[in-house]
Image: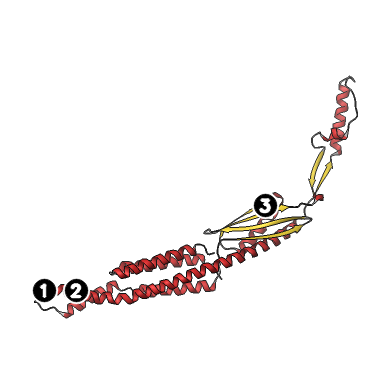
Amino acid sequence: MVKSMTGYGRGECSYEGGTFTIEVRSVNNRYLDCGIKMPRSFIFAEDAMKAQVQASISRGKVDVFVTQSAVAEDDTTVVVNEALAKSYIEALEHLYNLGGGHWVKGNYYAPDLARFPDVLTVEKKEQDQEQVKAGLLGALAQALTDFDSMRVREGQRLAQDILGRVETIENLVSKVEERSPQTVAEYRVRLTAKMNEILQSTQIEESRILTEAAIFADKVAVDEETVRLRSHIAQLREMLEQGGAVGRKLDFLIQEFNREANTIGSKCNDIEIARVVVDIKAEIEKIREQVQNLE
């Protein structure tokens, strides 16, 4: 089945008393462009997460958001730098002695010492990186599954719309095939009338009329173009049925649709066929717009 390039998915996972949420969102893009926004403490898992996204998505502008919340209370600890605190006390004693005893020597209270730089430091508990990475990848897998379901639903809608427009093109091509032989017969009638008008009583050679009509028929014949256009239509249906990442192939195929339609328009010498060709090109353009949304 075909998939849309646009989608959204969400996944969650818990770790050591905390939780993180992963959201995946994508929009159209010619190639795969994956960006991951996460807390710096999880940066070690970025490459593994990108590899998981690349294994699931072929193209599109993909943004992955990692949000951390509900961190465990015992995740951080306050550490006393005893050596540094003793150094501060010794320095204060030294200052007292330098003052010749004129300065008041007092008690050193803990709150006073705590105000000195780096006496107290806050340290986070070291994470088990493998455990956190496994949790992140598990949550990302959930998000990608949810994301993929949305893309499949949207892809089915796009495929149905494309197939409906392809059927319209087939009906229009049938009109061209039906009308094309009539243009040759009408040309022959017009040519005979014109030659009768010019030559008047002079006998007109039937062979000359047949030769001119044959030259005109060869010039305006669009049989090859309509056959190729029907072949492209069959190929498009086959691609949609096979599914997978066919968006780029379909984009190239639609260029061939346009080429055949343009050739038919340039070869035909009939206003009715010209109008039908305009309708065909309008449907092709609508299909091209939809194909741009497929992975």
Q: Which mark is residue 191?
A: 2
Question: In terms of depth relative to the viewer, which is nearer, 246 or 10?
Answer: 10
The CA distance from mark 3 to mark 2 is 77 Å
* Left or right of residue 230: residue 50: right
Q: Amino acid at mark 1?
A: Leu
- Earlier residue among tags 3 and 2: 3
Which residue occupies the extreme left position in the image? 201
Is any atom of residue 53 visible in this view? yes
Q: Residue at x 88, y 27 (%)?
A: 93
Asked if residue 199 is positioned above or below residue 90 in the image, the reply reads: below
Q: Which residue is mark 1?
A: 199
Quarter of the rendering containing residue 78: top right
Comparing labels 3 and 1, the label whose residue is closer to the camera: 1
Horizontal and vertical percent position of residue 129: 75, 55
Q: Do labels 3 and 1 touch, CB within 8 Å?
A: no
Which residue occupies the extreme bottom position in the image? 206
Q: Amino acid at mark 2?
A: Leu
- Earlier residue among tags 1 and 2: 2
* Left or right of residue 11: residue 176: left
Within 10 Å of the Cα at label 2, are there few (<14), some (14-19), or many (20+) other Cα atoms? some
- Earlier residue among tags 3 and 1: 3
The CA distance from mark 3 to mark 1 is 88 Å
Q: Which residue is mark 3?
A: 38
Q: Amino acid at mark 3?
A: Met
Question: In terms of depth relative to the viewer, which is nearer, 153 or 192?
Answer: 153
Quarter of the rendering containing residue 134: bottom right
